[in-house]
Image: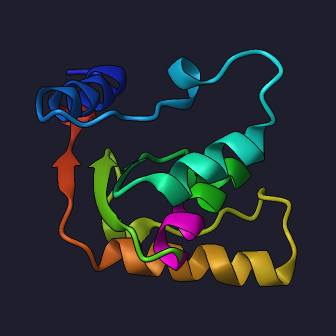
Amino acid sequence: MTFSSATGGSILGCIWLGLRPFLDSESMVPGDRLFERIDSAILECRLGMATLSPQYCDSYYCLHELALMMESKKKVIPIFCDVKPAGLRVSDSVVCSSEEKQRFTAALEEARNIVGITFDLANE
């Protein structure tokens, strides 16, 4: 199994359950404003799925999305791919204010305390 097949399987499972998943690479078109479109999708959703990988905490966008899901009290299912929940930390390479770093750290802490799905793809 690969990272993309783990994520794709989650998306297919949502479709099978009659849900309409928002996947930015599939749901956005040229000209869409990134934050407006993604934030709107998160605020309108009933369930959020965050696929957390070793590179997840290097991405301002991923951390912003997770923080917004947590702050808006969405039910979130974390999918841990090749990462242990305890190892999730905001990367020093993420350019953000101290307030944003606190938001992101709180969101990661909350994600660590949610029962999620774990894939150890590196050892398969």
Q: Which residues are magenta?
A: 66-71
Residue 120 left/right relative to 35: left
Q: In the displayed structure, would residue 11 be above or below residue 85?
A: above
Q: Place residue 17 in its image quadrant.
A: top left
Q: Which residue sits at x=30%, y=51%?
A: 80
Q: Quadrant of residue 106?
A: bottom right
Q: Quadrant of the N terminus?
A: top left
Residue 116 on image: x %, y %: 20, 60
Pinpoint residue 54: horizontal percent, then vertical percent: 47, 47
Magenta stretch contains residue 103: no
Q: Is residue 69 magenta?
A: yes
Q: Which residue is rendered at x = 65% and y = 60% of the image?
A: 64
Residue closest to the eye, 19 or 2:
19
Q: Residue 78 or 48: which is nearer the viewer?
A: 48
Q: Is residue 24 above or below residue 47?
A: above
Residue 104 x, y percent position in the rendering: 62, 73
Q: Nearer the viewer, residue 58 or 19?
A: 19
The one nearer the camera, 51 or 48, is 48
- Image position of 35 (left or right of 3): right
The quarter of the rendered structure image containing the C terminus is top left
Residue occupying the point 78% across, 56% down: 93
Residue at 80% over, 84% down: 99
In the displayed structure image, the side of residue 90 where residue 4 appears, left or right? left
Q: What secondary structure characterizes most of the magenta part?
A: helix
